[in-house]
Image: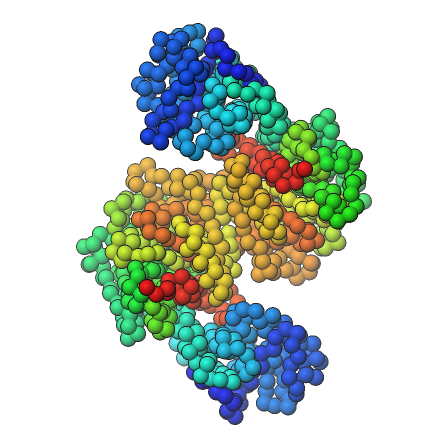
Amino acid sequence: MLKVRLRREPSDAAGAVHALPVAEGAAPPEPFRAAAAAARFTGRAGQVVECLIPGPRTLLVGTGPAAAPLDWERAGGEAVAHADEETRTLVLDARGLPPEAAAALASGACLRAWRFDRYRTKEVKPGLERLELVVDRPREVEPLWERAAAAVRGCLLARDLVAEPANHLTPAVFAERMESLSAHGIAVEVLGPKRLARLGFGALLAVGGGSANPPHLVVLRWKGRTGAAPVVFVGKGITFDTGGVSIKPAAGMEEMRADMAGAAACAGAMLALALRGSPAPAAAVLALAENAVGAASYRPGDVLRTLSGRTVEVLDTDAEGRLVLADALHYAATRLAPRAIVDVATLTGSIVTALGHHRAGLFGTQSALAAQLAAAGEAVGDLVWPMPIGERHREDLRSDIADLRQCAPHGSGAWGGRFLPDACHAAAFLREFTEGVPWAHLDIAGVELRREDEPLGIKGPSGFGARLLDALVAMRFEEEG
Amino acid sequence: MLEIAFAKPDALPRAGALVLPVAETEGGGAAAAAPGGLRQRADEATGGAVERALEAAAFKGRKGQTATIWAPGAGLSKVVAVGLGKESELSPEAAEAAGAALLPTITGESEAMVSAEHLPPPLAVALAMGAVLRAYRFDRYRTKEKEEDKPKLKRLTVATSDPDAARAAWAAQEAVAKGVYLARDLVSEPANVLNPAELAERCRQLESLGVEVEILGPKEMKKLGFGALLGVAQGSENEPRMVVMRWMGRSGAAGKGKGSDGAAASAARPLAFIGKGVTFDTGGISIKPAGGMEDMKWDMAGAGAVVGLMAALAGRKAKADVVGMIGLVENMPSGKAQRPGDVVKSYSGQTIEVINTDAEGRLVLADLLWYCQEKYDPRFMVDLATLTGAIIISLGHEHAGLFSNDDELAQRILAAGKAVGENCWRMPLGEAYDKQLKSDIADMKNVGGRPGGSITAAQFLQRFTNGKPWAHLDIAGTAWATKDQGSTPKGATAFGVRLLDRLVAEHYEG
């Protein structure tokens, strides 16, 4: 993350680029007024004009109506996006702005400045390293920034994990990296394959069975201080998804290294809560496995005994996420005494067809929880949309041989069976393992990776969900006593 | 259509079937017979056989439960008990469901009576509605059906405490049922029979109800400049049509609003319903896979619903001014057919690059939407279309996708749908989705790719609403049922007729 310093006056660091946020319709200060007019700068969101004179180099950054923190975040991101590759220091001038706006500007800048260069060995550009946030009263901004920075760090942890290729981030390595969270006061428990077998994680073990890298389950606990029951996040962490025996087509399969983005988002949210010392007790259960093709792979037609004792008929080994979540959800619901469960998973292609790359699918059993999730998503720019679980969706999961089947068979729907509401089926399946605990499910397939550069992040892992879950906790679960 | 009669519960029928709708008590058992009612009288006339049999069948009155007692005596061929569900949850929906559940048990009888005298008359009417809707069959093309397989029931007598009230309420419901039947007929018809010209001709039958019917052919549409619709139609031998149906139930005369001041003027503006009517959709040059293509005869279900709706509104003399508009084409591949890459100019003046000729419904609707808002300045436009396979992948078959630029209208549609069992689910719109339609050489492409496929289709339509209040129902998943469900038998559902009739009745009459 950028090194952020709060200052009263800009330093005169050599080569620093300055950025000046300007709200829509507001007049830019002299000496930039003429340049702004000549470039038809109106302060519209996303508009940036570079003023080379009188110096130092200054970017006028449009914030739009600047009604919400998100507008300021985007402006901070735009400023970074327009600083060129040679720039090491960005000076963001937030003087005259409310402290919340200043903190949001810095958040946006840090989110946009994230890069993943670990595996580049040649011609690595150092890029932006420092952010000077210039404010009138640093002491007022400081606590707000610390809070915002916690969420940013959480989001960037999620991105770092998602970006890692699957030969580097196996389930065991993922689990190992989670151990480092204990430095922040998070209790970390890792269940390896032997313990999972002893406890009866039949679904998680079956999915991971084909891989040389065995599955793990990670439980992260943040104690908080309200003494309430914890809110529990459950994350799908398929470190690579070949599809298994129901193997995927080759084109685009490399993206499947991101099939652990749900688990990464949950880990990121836990880090954010710990860094900002959230009063709310929280926990995360990460179901980590690699869905590989191997001699010990599970097969279509197999019947699995899940941790809950319920049996599941496998129709498609590429619908593995719901299987590992089934065990993780049951574990969360029965072992962690949660007040609510939110799972996050890159679960279905169907949700991409439904909502594209701009919104995640939101399913659940409690409308209040769903409404809060939607509001939290709006606040941080991780947009979601409510989706239904209908009676038919559950009926479609009746199995001839087991308690339920994991999805509807191909060819069973309308128009020659080409159209199946698989995201709804998956949600109906997961619901069976929530054991009556208030629950919501975010299907983040399609939003886990940005398809192009955006104000709050470059093309690649988005960290979707980390800041959303942090915001949810802040909005709903932090009441004391 | 099954005839419904209402009568006082004066006497047991002398023959045929007697149906007893029975609620479930809080204790979980069947409610007791009302003193002096038909159930008690039937029990007495059969020497206690009825109650003994219900006991033996463990009949509890649960929703959907039925018990049939064959030849119980007193000349009756059978007595059928049908569950109404929990006593405390009695509702029109529950009564309709019971009506639907009882129907299959009595279709072999020539006469039947339902003992509904213990139900409030509105519930007796809802029960009749369920039976009538469930009784729909499309058997026009069966030539060899065995006599014993054909339904014999022509008339169902509903015993009620207030036949006059029930009859009055039924008149409106019967009109709606007729609209549903008409829509189901149109959707069920094969495409070699029901081409655009034939469907347009069938709209003429609405004239007898007082609906003005105007039919535009290819010449008129060419003159108007319906380039998007005509591009779709050009591959087929069967010429396109547009049908405009006007029901002026409020103002009386066609197109003449009464008031000119403020609110009255707004109320005088008509409501508009627009239907996609692709009588068969091969996909055109972007041809569909063979599996399941026969289903594409119902790619005119949106138009079918609009025709059925107009019949319902006119049939019950709705006090509202309503314009129904359907765009009828056949989408065929041929030497004359539109190609991927073609650019067409829509009636609005906006140009469209046709990337996929199988995204043709939106092209048809584009011209109708613009024409409708320009010519009629309606209070709102609601379009119905079997538009995308993506909506089935999104929602399945229990909900139609609802897209709207107007929250109040959307809320009303959701509520009306819930009330009649035609459920909708709101889906998002937004600029980010709209961008997917960007074309390199025209104002827009007609598809935005797989991600968010139903949303980008709706975004496309929205570009032709000129910012007017509008809602779009993507009914691809709900227009056809693959199994019997409640009052909808397997086959064409007529989804939208009852929903939109209800919408008009709740908010736009009086």
Q: Is residue B159 visible?
A: yes
For residue A326, side relative to residue B431 (left or right): left
Determine whether A343 is above or below A32 in the image. above
Q: Is residue B229 visible?
A: no
Residue at x 52%, y 92% (from the top left corner): A12
The part of the image, by quadrant, that contains residue B68 is: top left
* Closer to us: B302 or A365: A365
The number of numbered badges drawn on the structure is 0
* Closer to us: B321 or A38: B321
Residue at x 51%, y 44% (from the top left corner): B392
Determine whether A158 is above or below B336 in the image. below
Q: Residue A71 appears at what percent x and percent y?
A: 55, 70
Quadrant where the image shows the C terminus of chain B: top right
Residue furthest to the front? B35
What coloring was used for the rendering?
rainbow
* Closer to us: B39 or B458: B39
For residue B262, side relative to residue A451 (left or right): right
* Closer to us: A445 or A438: A438
Q: Residue A15 appears at what percent x and percent y?
A: 53, 90
The part of the image, by quadrant, that contains residue A288 is: bottom left
Residue at x 69%, y 37% (from the top left corner): B320
Q: Residue B270 appears at what percent x and percent y?
A: 72, 42
Determine whether B68 is above or below B412 in the image. above
Residue at x 37%, y 21% (from the top left corner): B32
Q: Residue A368 appears at what percent x and percent y?
A: 43, 54
Quadrant where the image shows the N terminus of chain B: top right
Determine whether B489 is above or below A182 in the image. above
